[in-house]
Amino acid sequence: MVARGLTRRYGSRAALHGIDLTLARGDCLGLLGLNGAGKSTTLKILTGVLAPHAGSVSFCGHDLARAPLAAKRHLGFLPDVPPLFTDASVDEYLALCAQLREVTALGEAVARAKARCGLADVGPRLIRNLSKGYQQRIGIAQAIVHEPAVLVLDEPTVGLDPVQIRDVRQLITDLARQHAVILSTHLLAEVQQICTRVAVLHQGRLVHEGALGGDDCWLRLRLRATVSADQLQALAGVQQVTASDDGSWLLRVNSPAAAEHIALGVAQQHLGLLELRPADSAIEQTFLDLTIGAAAAPAVHA
Amino acid sequence: MINVVLRRELQSLFRAPFAWAVLAVTQLIIAYQFLAQVEIFTELQPRLARMAMPPGVTQLVVQPLLVTIAMLLLFIVPALTMQTLAGERRAGTLALWYSAPVALRTLVLGKFGGVLALLGVIWIGAALMPFTLAWGTALDLGTLAAGLLGLALLMAAATAIGLFFSALTSQPTLAALGGFGCLMFLWLCDWSARVDGEPTLFTHLSMMKHFQPFVRGYVDSADVAYFLIVIVSALVLTVWRLDGDRRAF
């Protein structure tokens, strides 16, 4: 388990303002934010690569600043660039990583990490000669080889092809059952697909933190007639209405079953129903609201 | 834990052709000089025989050899240490060490040991060559041992300085240049010594001035202390510099 007090960091400018995050086994927290929002800085502080100006991080009760070695034993980290020794073979590299984290059953740990990341058949090959997708998976294998309680992944699917992205997401979902996982990304769909909780960073502040999914869901509605938001708001089951750039509407409803009432209402008013479907990314709207719309909003805990 | 870092450092050094090239070139130069000195020694033999206190084979062959190796080290060591930290910083692999349960001093000592182990091969070569003369001549083992001790201390000091410059930057070539510049300065800095031979601050700083007594067979505790101080301070500065990477200012 992980607990974090306020954390903060400056270059010459403020990068993070008092971020609070907690994580329990089985959690998969997605850290979202625009470029430069402070995602990587947050992850570097969580993993001891950077020290915070204020605040503390602890793993399984070990404070990262006071007992760094004990704390880091429970930590697996995949930075944005996988830290690979390209002149080593996959087996050698993973064995080295396991030794660094004081794993006793070395061969077993390496074999298990390789099996989970689909690396079983490339063990003796030099890392330098493997493709980017393999290298990314070696980076993940490196982070899980010692079965850490907390797994920190910085943009784990960047640069992968669609099949590899699907595999890696599946792998992370599996890992999240036994480990606490925190991952950063700017892909909203990724968070929606694999995370149980989401935290949104904007300009170094935590603007949203809460469970994902829940009862909320979003519908995308396209009409031939021109209507006002108030008109749609009046439909049964609609909680919130937002106009989308492409002329369609995003409706927040309390349950997917509300679609039936909306369709009925729209048909009765002869508004010309062209499209009504679940919105691709429910959190997209939340995200855009939080980062662009309500930039200065204080932290919201859902 | 230090063994893990040391083994990794050796792996990284020996997986690249550079270390092998360094070993080959050094060995070639040393061997050539060794043969040349032996040649001179045999030519001088008749004249030496007429002298009351002739210089021995150790003075005529081994001492110039050690000085040559010392000069070579000024070039070689920064080239070997440049990748250790600067290369890792550039490749982004320092994050692996930083996020692993490894203390910075363990990391630095491991890397120090790794480079020293490679230099140890050169040291062994330098030690074995004079021993081939032991069959035909009388070696001054005491002088030889003192010289080899001095060489080992010089290797360690140069490695520690090289590591420090490697910790400063993410550009290996810059690290090599910095290390080389610093070693060269330390080697030659008593150029500014006064004509009357009165020692100045630079005389005390000069690595050459502290190395030469070893070659001549004197082990002075002041010289040993000089090298130990250089080694320890460079290593401590390296750890500080790495800590500065993540510390909040």
Image: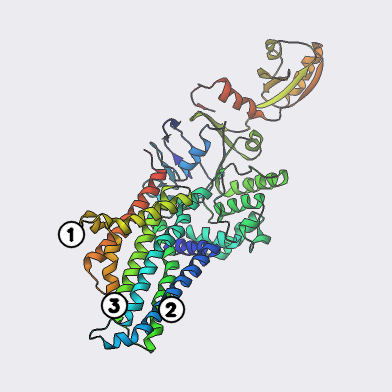
Which element is circle 3 on? Answer: helix
Pointer 1 chain: B
Q: Amino acid at mark 2?
A: Leu
Name the front one of labels 3 and 1.
1
Residue at 22 percent across and 65 percent down: it is: B222
Sequence-first disc among 2 and 1: 2
Sequence-first disc among 2 and 3: 2
Which element is circle 1 on? Answer: loop
Label 2 packing within 10 angstroms: few (<14), some (14-19), many (20+):
few
Which residue is denoted by mark 2 in the rendering?
B35
Decide which of A17, A131 is in the foreground and name it. A131
Residue B86 percent across, percent down from the top left: 46, 51
Label 3 packing within 10 angstroms: few (<14), some (14-19), many (20+):
many
Residue B120 percent across, percent down from the top left: 42, 70
Q: Residue B196 — which label?
A: 1
Q: Is residue A101 above or below residue B144?
A: above
Q: Amino acid at mark 3?
A: Thr
Name the front one of labels 2 and 1.
1
Residue B94 in sight here:
no
Residue A197 percent across, percent down from the top left: 57, 36
Given contact means CB atoms under 8 Å apart, are the residues at marks 2 and 1 in contact? no
Q: Is residue A91 above or below residue B169?
A: below
Hey, which quadrant is residue B204 in on the image? bottom left
In the displayed structure image, the side of residue B67 where residue A178 appears, left or right: right
Q: Residue B143 — which label?
A: 3
Given contact means CB atoms under 8 Å apart, are the residues at marks 3 and 1 in contact? no
Q: Are marks 2 and 3 on the same chain?
A: yes
Viewport quadrant of the C terminus of chain B: top left
In the displayed structure image, the side of residue A157 where residue B101 appears, left or right: left
Q: Spatial distance from mark 2 to mark 1, Cα to Cα?
A: 37 Å
Q: Spatial distance from mark 2 to mark 3, Cα to Cα?
A: 20 Å
Given contact means CB atoms under 8 Å apart, are the residues at marks 2 and 3 in contact? no
